[in-house]
Amino acid sequence: MESIIPVSLPNNSYNIHIASHGLSTLGERIKELNLGKKILVVSNPEIFDYYGDIAVKSLENAGFTVNYHLIPAGENYKTLEYLAKIYDSALKFSLERNSTLLALGGGVVGDMTGFAAATWLRGINFVQVPTSLLAMVDASVGGKTGVNHPQGKNLIGAFYQPKLVLIDPTVLKTLLDREFRAGMAEVIKYGVIWDKTLFEALEDANNLDSLNNFDEMLLNDILVRSCHAKAEVVSQDEKEGGLRAILNYGHTIGHVIESLTNYETFVHGEAVAIGMVTAGNLAVKMGLWSASEAKRQDLLIEKTGLPTAIPANLDVESAIAHLQTDKKVQAGKVRFILPSSIGKVIITDQVTDDLLRTELNK
């Protein structure tokens, strides 16, 4: 079974391929793109132990010269310091302008590899092979790349589209349940902001907190529908001039929680889940969303085993100040993405600090 989802852009269109056991075909798929012969695979040690041999052998069998660079796993390493180490490897292995950086891993690996590709020799080829659910449905699609600054997440980055995204659902079998749940936060996000049918399919599922509870058809459905949703949004707004900002639903507060807890307490999807609950509550209090639909969202998040409560020790004033570093700030006002119905959201700068304080102090 294979699904091909086009990401249609003015200058940099590409396809998302969702193919069971597709990793072993990686080399032939890249060969069809007529890229250069040198490929630097960027991964983390654990993922590379599982899947590095399959990926490298596939690439070598297709005629590519392959080297690899490993970065430690975790958001704490998504920094300029560790980005520079990718550049060092690019120099060591003499990557040229027609060479390729290939991300084999989750969102951190994809973001860093993409930014390295965007900036090395002013831009070389980039391929995404996501291995986490979160990366498959969100981080690998759309061309957002970057690293964190000590004062905020993803403040340093570039829009840079891959040549190919290859999603092999079978690699999820080695993903920890916690990381699977984190990816489900992004899937729920797509249901709230864009795809009511996806949301209702998740409601109909008995349990969402582990891959073991998904049959092949449901897993394929959430991958295809989530990627379709993101591809449709990105195709309409490649560089977040307007509509694409809706993809940040739950992320405004989520990024603050991650930053203020030093990326040590919550993984990204957990923080996004809390951010979605908070955004839903704000929408209800502002009269934008019904309490009944907000409850449906929260029950879905709870069914996935994700956290829903603001951390008890969160410094509210620091959180409000931190929001000013958000990339969506315009004219000093933070823009929030808030639901108006399941499948639809709005972008607003009318969330007051007092309303935020009330919600964050719960």
Image (cartoon, rainbow, N blue to C red):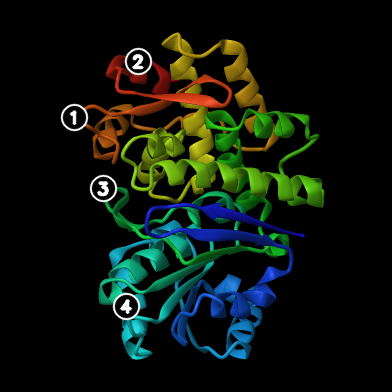
Mark 1, residues whose alpha carbon is within 10 Å: few (<14), some, or many (≥20)?
Answer: few
**Chain-order first, disc 2 or disc 4:** 4
Q: Nearer the viewer, mark 3 or mark 1?
A: 1
* Callout 3: SS: loop
Q: Residue furthest left?
A: 331
Residue at the disc numbered 4: 87
**Chain-order first, disc 1 or disc 4:** 4
Q: Which amino acid lies under the numbered mark 1 shown in the image of this protein?
A: Gly
**In the image, residue 34 above or below residue 93:** above
Marker disc for residue 355 = 2
**Chain-order first, disc 3 or disc 1:** 3
Q: CA distance from mark 2 to mark 1?
A: 17 Å
Q: Where the N terminus falls, by quadrant? A: bottom right
* Callout 2: SS: helix
Residue at the disc numbered 1: 332
Q: Nearer the viewer, mark 2 or mark 4?
A: 4
Of residue 314 and residue 158, the one placed in the foreground of this image is 158
Q: Which amino acid lies under the numbered mark 4 shown in the image of this protein?
A: Tyr
